[in-house]
Amino acid sequence: MRKYTIGMLVVNQSGVLTRISGMFARRGFNIDSLEVGVTEDPTRSRMTITMTGEDYDRDQIVKQLEKLHDVLVVREMIPESIVSRELILLKVSASSANRQEIIDAVNIFRNKIIDFSPESLCIEATGETSKIEAFIELMKQYGILELCRTGTVSLDRGTKSLTNS
């Protein structure tokens, strides 16, 4: 089993996300993460989907996505030629006894404290998924109160893009 990243440009209209996620569900494939947002062109949205499977599974998903009329471009993104990031907002329990330890960890990971209260800290973390996972694991010892996580966003390195691949 491998992790695959699929980049797509789709028509920016209601129902497109439902059709794409429904296609995954009908074929029994799970989406590990899904990110979608409008592009510089307001008539298009960009989707980044990560999934785990075999090469055959990836090939089938790409072929099925290409058949959907709202999908303009679909392409597997090769890990060696992309930059990927993820964002989390994390609220952690913080007492006067452990607050400085948490602040030090936030600084070492180059994250940001975005809210401060006597009982907790709210932290913004961005980076590659492995960095995010390591930070979450470290924060568990302090007591994670709440966590919100985006999907992976990816762009090709250099001048290559979904539209000129």
Image (spheres, rainbow, N blue to C red):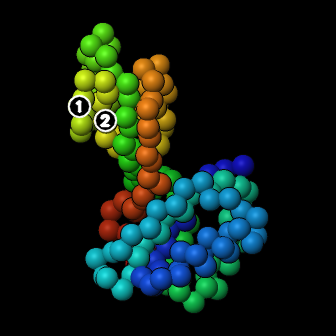
Q: Residue at x 32, y 68 (%)?
A: 159
Which residue is identified by label 1?
116
Q: Are marks 2 and 1 in contact (CB under 8 Å)?
A: yes
Placement of 118 over or under 9, stated as above or below: above
Q: Position of residue 115 (x, y in %)?
A: 24, 36
Q: Position of residue 20 (x, y in %)?
A: 60, 75
Say what secondary structure mark 2 lies in: strand
Q: Nearer the viewer, residue 160 or 23?
A: 23
Q: Nearer the viewer, residue 77 or 100?
A: 100
Q: Tell me which label, 2 or 1, sits earlier in the chain.
A: 1
**Amino acid type, mark 1:** Phe
Q: Residue at x 73, y 57 (%)?
A: 54
Quarter of the image for the C terminus: give it. bottom left
Left or right: 147 in relation to 121: right
Say what secondary structure mark 1 lies in: strand
Rendered image quadrant of residue 163: bottom left
Q: Residue at x 68, y 65 (%)?
A: 58
User: How many badges with numbers are in the image?
Assistant: 2
Residue 101 appears in the rendering: no
Placement of 4 over or under 122, stated as above or below: below
Rendered image quadrant of residue 9: bottom left
**Amino acid type, mark 2:** Cys
Rendered image quadrant of residue 23: bottom right
Which residue is identified by label 2?
122
Badge number at residue 98? none
Mark 2, residues whose alpha carbon is within 10 Å: few (<14), some, or many (≥20)? many
